[in-house]
Image (cartoon, grey):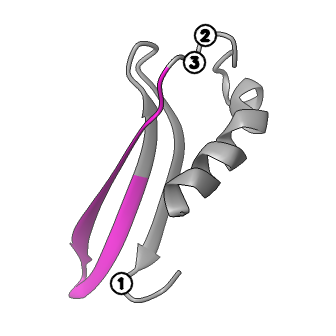
């Protein structure tokens, strides 16, 4: 469900971040857990590989939404 929400949210804002929505063909979403000063946190990134453009970024402490 989270990925579906990202795709729905990214569609309308692509033009405002420098990526022309007509040029976006694929959106890859990846996540990783990192340690920030002893506190676990998740980082999510939405990326368009052909344009080499990061479309969105989100970080949250582990256990939060």
> Is the residue 42 above or below the residue 49 in the image?
below
- Residue 59 on the magenta span: no
Q: Which residue is mark 1?
A: 62
Spatial separation of the CA atoms under disc 2 and disc 1: 34 Å
- Residue 34, position as x, y percentages in the image: 23, 69
- Comparing 38 with 41, the one in front is 41
Q: Earlier in the sequence, mark 2 or mark 1?
A: 2
Q: Earlier in the sequence, mark 3 or mark 1?
A: 3
Circle 3/circle 2 CB separation < 8 Å: yes
Q: Is residue 52 left or right of residue 38?
A: right
Which residue is drawn at the image coordinates 53% and 62% (left, top)? 2
- Residue 48, position as x, y percentages in the image: 45, 25
Spatial separation of the CA atoms under disc 3 and disc 1: 30 Å
Q: Residues within 10 Å of mark 2 (few under 14, many from 20)?
A: few
Q: Residue 41 shows which numbered tag?
A: none
- Residue 24, position as x, y percentages in the image: 57, 18
In terms of secondary structure, where does tag 3 sit?
A: loop
> Is the residue 64 above or below the residue 57 in the image?
below
- Comparing 4 with 13, the one in front is 4
- Range of residues picked out in magenta: 26-44
Q: Residues within 10 Å of mark 1 (few under 14, many from 20)?
A: some
In terms of secondary structure, where does tag 2 sit?
A: loop
Please state which of the two labelled residues, at mark 2 or mark 1, is closer to the viewer: 2
Q: Which residue is mark 2?
A: 23
Magenta stretch, main secondary structure class: strand
Q: Is residue 62 left or right of residue 12?
A: left
Q: Which residue is mark 3?
A: 24
Q: Residues within 10 Å of mark 3 (few under 14, many from 20)?
A: some
Spatial separation of the CA atoms under disc 3 and disc 2: 4 Å
Circle 3/circle 1 CB separation < 8 Å: no
């Amino acid at each position: 469900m989270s990925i579906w929400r990202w795709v729905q949210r990214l569609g309308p804002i692509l033009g405002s971040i420098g990526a022309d929505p007509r040029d976006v063909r694929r959106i890859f979403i990846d996540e990783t857990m990192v340690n920030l000063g002893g506190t676990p946190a998740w980082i999510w990134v939405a990326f368009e590989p052909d344009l080499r453009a990061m479309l969105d970024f989100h970080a949250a402490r582990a256990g939060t939404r």
